[in-house]
Amino acid sequence: MGRLFGTDGVRGVANADLTAEMALGLSVAAAHVLAEAGTFEGHRPTAVVGRDPRASGEFLEAAVVAGLASAGVDVLRVGVLPTPAVAYLTGALGADLGVMLSASHNAMPDNGIKFFARGGHKLADELEDRIESVYDSHRHGEPWERPTGAGVGRVRDYEEGFDAYVGHLLNVLPNRLDGLKIVLDEAHGAAAGVSPEAFRRAGAEVVTIGAEPDGLNINDGCGSTHLGKLKAAVVEHGAHLGIAHDGDADRCLAVDHTGDEVDGDQILAVLALAMRERSELRSDTVVATVMSNLGFKLALEREGLKLVQTSVGDRYVLEEMKEHGYALGGEQSGHVIILDHATTGDGTLTGLLLAARVAQTGRPLRELAGVMDRLPQVLINVPDVDKSRVKTSAELAAAVTEAERELGATGRVLLRSSGTEPLVRVMVEAADIEQAQSVAGRLADVVKSALG
């Protein structure tokens, strides 16, 4: 069996790759592994279980709940809530385990299982590996130890989770949003209820799109991966800004009043300056990945802030933040982590804080986001090459050196091997799009000839 856990839990096509039997088995295995690790010692264990609105989440939730209860874990079923809400409630309720059923921005047929440890933090890799190993052993016939009688877990719906999470979001806000008109695109996803409620309670006039989940329409032509409808709606309604989430609402992208996109890099820049003003930006440092636009780095330098860059993936951003105590980090895609108030990316919290900055300054989002200029960025995927030789090819190294010399301080080259496919990604940033396209094209040709 190949490794089930990826960088963001277990994902696959629901009822094909990710079955009810697998969901049940992984949940039982997680309970046993955490019990062996001493997590449940001295008390009766509790788990928080939530999901996004996908139709498959209904049967997968039932399987997870059954598995946990059969292993002696009491379950608080919070229903449809965002991933960051499940993480928050896991910590706030003192639960030993959290489980979220979602495939985030993926299409509806997919689903996924993500486990949170006590406190709402992602499980350590070694625990995920152990869960996989235990699951595999029992899948091939090794019997489980099963509690009986009063030892089995009890299950109840925890409807208070909705208001508890919204209350948490509002408590974080530094100021109200009165006077702002905001369009929210909820991607027909997990935040369709809590996000509009939070923005309204904060004082904003709210227009919603993509807020009628039916189990089948999640991420379908809407949300943070399809901004066209939000751009049109912001202009149509004369709104001050628009906010878009993905299916499980751990991402946030924005649109200014003219309908232009404000990406994750720009959001991070705006929030960094706001947090520094409030003395909340520890070490005057922001953490982002190597895919962040060079314009973001230049803007932070101009403002006297430091940038720490990690490998691609919000898990690496989070690891760096936790290790060094940084308060703000994220990705260009809209995963923004505000570690004092969330253990994972929280799209609703990010959107609220962005809107709060607009309300507090009285400046339009377009002006605030203008703190950074996005340099043109060209990405070319070069397939069917020996990606293992990216770092050892002398021919390729010479071509990169020449490209970097040509681009100078206002450009950048990044070559990355795909983690899942036999291809190399060539990314070039430059002062103008024509130069970026030219340099990227030449480098892609060298990748083909040197690694083909």
Image (spheres, rainbow, N blue to C red):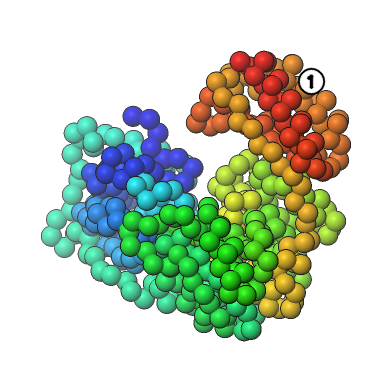
Q: Position of residue 325 (x, y in %)?
A: 66, 56
Outermost residue on the left side: it is: 149
In the image: residue 276, left or right of residue 329: right
**Residue 352 appears in the figure:** no
Vertical order, 92 against 310 (above or below): below
Q: Residue at x 58, y 64 (%)?
A: 232
Residue in the picture at 67% in, 31% down: 426
| Secondary structure type for disc 1 | helix
Q: Quadrant of the N terminus?
A: top left
Q: Amino acid at mark 1?
A: Ala
Foreground of the two, 58 or 9: 58
In the picture provided, is 216 more to the left or to the right than 176? left
Tell me: 143 left or right of 430: left
Q: Residue furthest front?
A: 236
Instruction: Choose top left, top right, bottom left or bottom right for residue 251.
Output: bottom right
Q: Of 139 and 403, which appears nearest the observer?
A: 403
Please report the residue visible at 86 percent of the width from the left and 36 percent of the height from the top: 408
Q: Is residue 106 above or below residue 167?
A: above
**Residue 95 % position (x, y):** 38, 63
State the image quarter where residue 152 is shown.
Answer: bottom left
- Residue at figure coordinates x 74%, y 16% from the top left: 395
The quarter of the image holding the C terminus is top right
Establish if 210 lies above or below 21: below
**Residue 348, horizontal then vertical, whole percent:** 53, 67
Question: How many numbered discs sit on the rendered protein?
Answer: 1
Q: What residue did someone put label 1 on? A: 398
| Circle 1 crowding by C-alpha within 10 Å: few under 14, some 14–19, many from 20 | few
Q: Is residue 282 above or below residue 385?
A: below
Residue 374 on image: x %, y %: 75, 51
For the question of whether residue 15 can be seen, the reply is yes
